[in-house]
Image (cartoon, grey):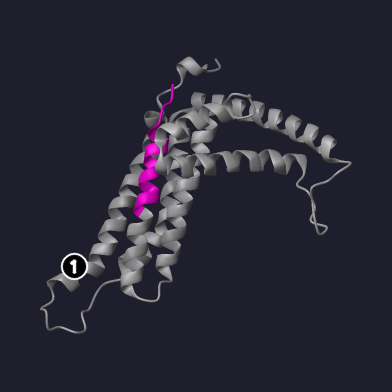
Amino acid sequence: MTATSNDLPARRRRHARLIAALTTLIGACAEAAGAVYQPIAAASPGTEDVEVNVLPCVQVSLTAAALLDRARAEDDARWPAAMAWERAQAQRTYAARCALAQAQEVVERDDPPSRNDVPLPTVEQAAAMDLVSAGTEVTARWRTDPEEAVALVHELAAGGELAVDEILDEAVDAAALTGLLALQEARTAPDPSTAAELCLNAVSHIALAVTLASADLD
């Protein structure tokens, strides 16, 4: 039997393993920063060279992406009916975006907006880019005004080319990716303090991913 929207679990249940992994990652980032800052705080005021441990910063950076990928796979395995419904929704909205992009391509054929021989994206590429753009825009808006971001989600989904959960899931990915990129920088930071700061900087993005993964606008 195919699931309907009424049969779907709440988003915080659908993404429970991912949310748990994200919160684990937040704790790991804080512990990694503490391994740098705590020895400095414990040292006597006259100490010039304090030995700190930057290894946790490196470790959290190396393991973060795999942790989140594994959690996503576990969530998908726990909710196969929901995953099938999401896949069907994604096929429908993707087809709608392709149709819209194709219509736009016809309109622009006589007056292409490209410059300097830069090729225009294909219909399929444009359809994929629209989803990524929507997720990124919602993530940025949520940082400053969640109510405005919610209104934007509904506005983006109104035409049928995007689904609410599809937009929110893309927003989760955008926030998590920003956090992962900060952790990647921490791995190659020039000094322990910078590595610790980057770990803490990643926390705000990961926490936003938790919020977006839990958000159930219905």
In the picture as drawn, the residue positioned furthest to the right comes out as: 110
Q: Residue 213: image x %, image y %?
A: 41, 36
Q: Residue at x 47, y 45 (%)?
A: 140
Mark 1 neighbour density, 10 Å: few (under 14) some (14–19) many (20 or more): few
For the residue labelled by badge 1, is the local secondary structure a helix, a strand or a loop?
Answer: helix
Res 161 → quadrant:
top right
Residue bearing the label numbered 1: 38
| Residue 21 x %, y % | 36, 45
Task: Please state the horizontal and vertical placement of residue 17, each as a whole percent of the image.
Answer: 38, 38
In the picture, the quarter occupied by the N terminus is: top right
On the image, the x and y values in percent for residue 14 come to 42, 30
Q: Where, quadrant-wise, is the C terminus in this rendering? A: top left
* Residue 211 located within the stretch drawn in magenta: yes
Report the span colored magenta: 203-218
Identify the residue at image location x=49%, y=35%: 168
Which image quarter: residue 200? bottom left
Which of 88/92 is in front?
92
Q: State whether residue 14 is above or below residue 8.
A: below
Q: Is residue 57 magenta?
A: no
Q: Main secondary structure of the magenta part?
A: helix
Name the residue: 46% across, 35% down.
149
Residue type marked 1: Gln
Across the whole image, how many numbered discs are drawn on residues?
1
